[in-house]
Amino acid sequence: MKQWRYAHILWTVLLMLPAGGSGQTLPDNNLLVLHHLIIEPLVQMVWQTVPPRERIYLSVSGQAGLARWITDTTVPLLLAKKFRVYKTDNDSVNYRIGVTGARVRITYRPLARNWLTRVTRWQRRIEVRGTVEIVTSAGEVKGVQPLQSDYEDILTISPRQLENAEYPFTRGQVDDTTRWKKWVEPILISAATITVVALFFTIRSQQR
């Protein structure tokens, strides 16, 4: 059985760290939101399905970095609930918990800008996808649950303050498509139209 004595302590310290800045109350950082969306439902499902003190094996596959984080974060919590978690899958295991297709998508959409065109408000969207399956050593499926959540909120600080450089999957992408189509694209079309009309009259005046 693998020893996870330090992982739980490190995770606790991580959650206590501020997302960035001081003198203001900041929203939950992306890693903490993912803990609420992924880890808590996973642990709750195991707790409700598998009897305490059973020998279990956790297997996680999916997005690079995310799968490892799910494993390292979940195992100490399962150990704290008195489950006997094995490092490898073998004949001693009574239950196998599989998380497959785990992935995360984080996007930020600008909602408002000040007079210097700096973004002052953002919509943050975090999407989680995957599947959790619990199977006994005899092959009996005890539970299957989609790991699917969509989280949205409004930020009044830079979204980059809520990311963690150590975990690439906490980084989001800026989605400015809506603003581009609503404002920039019509302006460019209008400018192009005015230019064509102006050239047309300039050419006609030169031909006279």
Image: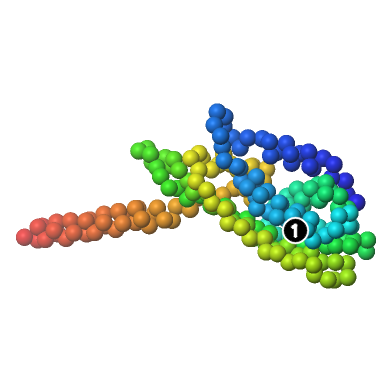
Horizontally, is 127 left or right of 53 in the view?
left
How many numbered dots are placed on residues in this image?
Answer: 1
Give the labeled residue for mark 1. 45
Q: Quadrant of residue 113?
A: top left
Amino acid carrying label 1: it is Met
In this view, the residue farthest toward the right is 92
Horizontally, is 72 left or right of 53 in the view?
left
The image position of residue 118, as x and y in percent, is 42, 40
- Residue 88 in view, yes or no: no
Instruction: Name which residue lies at 63% across and 60% down.
Output: 148
- Residue 207 in view, yes or no: yes
Horizontally, is 139 left or right of 147 in the view?
right
In this view, the residue farthest toward the left is 208
Q: Quadrant of residue 185?
A: bottom left
In this view, the residue farthest toward the top is 23
Nearer the observer, 22 or 101: 22
The image position of residue 33, as x and y in percent, is 63, 47
The quadrant in which the C terminus is found is bottom left
